[in-house]
Image (cartoon, rainbow, N blue to C red):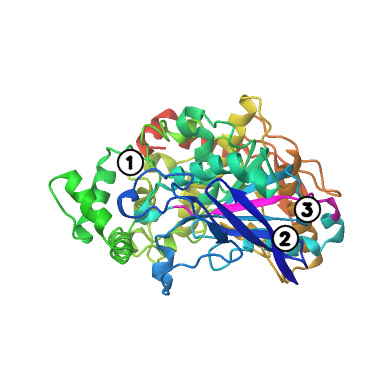
Amino acid sequence: MRGLSPTVTLHYGSFTGLTNTTTGIVYYRSVRFADAPVGNLRWQAPVSPPSKHLGHVDASQARQPAYSSILQSLYFEPDSTALLSSQRGQATRSRDRPVKIVYSGMSSFPSPQNPQASSLYWYISTVRVTTLRLLLKPLVFVTFQYRLGQFGFLGLWDQRAALEWVQRYISEFGGDPKQVTTWGQSAGAGSTMYHLVAEGGNDRRLFQRAMGDSPPLLSMPAYTHPFVENLLTQCAGLAGCSSAKEKDTMSCLRAATTQQLAFTGSATLANLTSALFPFGPILDGKFIAQRPVETFKQNRSNTNEGTRWSVELANPAANTSEPNATENTVFNFLSGQWPGLTRKTFDVAIGPGLYPASDLSNFSTQGQQFYGEMRFICTALLIGGTFHDAGIPAYGYHWDNPILGSDHTSELVMFYTLNPAFDPLDTQLAADMRAYWTSFATDGVPKAAKAPVWETAKTNGSPRMLLHPEQVGMEAVTSELTDHCEFWHSQTLITELNT
């Protein structure tokens, strides 16, 4: 059964939500937190809160993307920057509920097509374990749209604006602005960490806790780097906006239709056959002022993080899954993601003591281990160690599931599954993980009723929690992995790889 929730009034409009009386979740959808980033506001910092009064808004339904095709929906430009907020528990006037802000990963999840995903999936999945449901405290879930791809990466500024919006308005929705936790997976974990180092580490007390599952580390060139300039030149040319004057180019791009820019982004990606993610954060000297390797502050990792990535590349010379792959293929794949990587550094890495091919089953496995450790696993250990050295508790984990798989994002099935075909061991592991994650958001310490105590990480990110269906408990990081991470995070390679 569903009924309308009380209307929330903000200074720029009033918003009527929707209560699901079966679950007790109250939804406020498509609550605009900034002006639409279109026209002259394209590629500009967000204007938040909205500059015009919105009147009364029916916030019971989410706005839908304007395009029907999958490709266009992946790259659509929203006509409104919207915040999707959902509150777990019956509607009350309480303003002291912890707030959990969820950043999506590579795709928009929860998406406008499934706006209830963040809270509803979590709620229904935890209801399966009665003892866990009794342990959990009410939460306010918040997720929002932000610009990506050729429409950004102003997404970081959009996220910052949303964090500021939460501080100003979340109490009207039952949340406590002094108990805010950010959580993201993959690119969402990257978002979390960029906010930890934003503006030289000035978090403005916008959040109190940060969680990141599989934090990614990509090449982050300065905004003046030739790669960035060439990317702009390509996009402008494909959009029909080439000009000798930068001002004219940007005016033309801002006047282009959303369909034109959707095509431009897709065509640009098609031309870059060896790079997975050419559109990404850069060193702009303001939001991100220094290389993230030295300042990232979070800790999460999986077993086979590098699995399947190169399979997505169109260039066979960089696709390590090809049957005729060689060490050159592995180098081409890695240099496509970190253009600064030299052959000299690669040759050192494949030598004795690091990643010799003789220790691995094939070149695909070699590329997976390179990529997984460089991009995700070593990043997590570095950040956990950084937190520890700063006197801040950090909790790392190692997800390893022989049945469900241990590659990138595979752990999300433990959180977002409506009808899982779990065996009893997986069901219990899911219950433990949901309890750990939720208690961290509500109390600042990951706890599960019948599971081991989660110890904090030390200088090298060790120990970490092993999350395995047959074993949940603390484990030490191997000396081999520590050596690999020290190699990638040496000052020489920080400069070479722009990390």
Can you say whether 472 is above or below 354 in the image? Answer: below
Residue topped by disc 1: 340
How far apart marks 2 and 1 lie (CA) works out to 48 Å
Of badges 2 and 1, nearer the viewer stands 2
Q: Quadrant of the C terminus?
A: top left
Please state which of residues 394 and 146 is positioned toward the viewer in this rendering: 146
Point out the residue furthest to the left here.
244
Residue topped by disc 3: 432
Of badges 3 and 1, nearer the viewer stands 3
The amino acid type found where label 3 is placed reads Asp
Q: Which residue is drawn at 59% across and 61% down?
A: 59
Whole-percent x and y of residue 330?
39, 53
Q: Does residue 196 appear anywhere in the picture?
A: yes
Please state which of residues 67 and 445 is positioned toward the viewer in this rendering: 67
How far apart marks 2 and 3 lie (CA) works out to 23 Å
Residue 142, magenta (yes or no): yes
Q: Which of marks 3 and 1 is nearer the N terminus?
A: 1
